Image (cartoon, grey):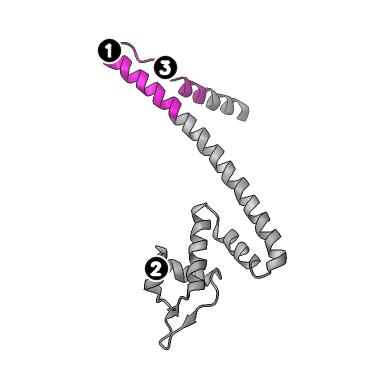
Amino acid sequence: MDFSIAQAAKITGLAAHTLRYYEREGLLPRLRRDSTGNRLFDENALETLLFICCLKKTGMSIQAIRVFMDSRKDESAGLHGRVAILEQHRRDVLKRIAAFEENLATIDEKLSYYRQAAAAADSGEPIPPCGLCALHKKQVHLAAESRQ
């Protein structure tokens, strides 16, 4: 059964222009056209689109998805290529997770400081200095000294 671009967009949750973009980028199998030139998406194309959505949700780039999709054309050698692509992508995701964890720790420190500062202000006590701000000032000072 064939689906129009509007139907494919609804099924996949992607915008029609995204479907056209994926076709231009070579991520989809060659799409057939109807007599008026409109794209026809068969079940294979829809499955491919949903698979691309899965990879995109993990943060995989279009370039990496293209390489991954191209590797599917060579079943035997392609399997090792797909393993390598996914292993690299996993390493990249772990790096991003580590960066997010650092950012979250910074947010938690700032949140703790501002809660303490708000409590101090509410009770009429002096607001304590922010240790993280002092650290940042020191880093800026050291960087300025190293440039001299």
Count of numbered badges drawn on the protein: 3
The stretch of residues the image draws in magenta is 108-137
- The nearer-to-camera label among 3 and 2 is 2
Looking at the picture, tell me which residue is in the foreground, 57 or 123: 57
The residue carrying pointer 3 sits among few (fewer than 14), some (14 to 19) or many (20 or more) residues within 10 Å by Cα, namely: few
**Which quadrant would the N terminus be assigned to in this image?**
bottom left
Tell me what residue is drawn at x 50 percent, y 57 percent: 54
Along the horizontal axis of the image, is 124 left or right of 72?
left
Label 1 sits on a secondary structure element that is: loop
Q: Earlier in the sequence, mark 2 or mark 1?
A: 2
Q: Position of residue 107 (x, y in %)?
A: 44, 31
- Disc 2 vs disc 1: Cβ atoms closer than 8 Å? no
Amino acid beneath label 2 = Ala
Q: Quadrant of residue 8?
A: bottom left
Amino acid beneath label 3 = Pro
* Residue that numbered label 2 is attached to: 9
Tell me what residue is drawn at x 37 percent, y 72 percent: 6
Along the horizontal axis of the image, is 100 left or right of 114?
right
Looking at the picture, tell me which residue is in the foreground, 40 or 124: 40
Label 3 sits on a secondary structure element that is: loop
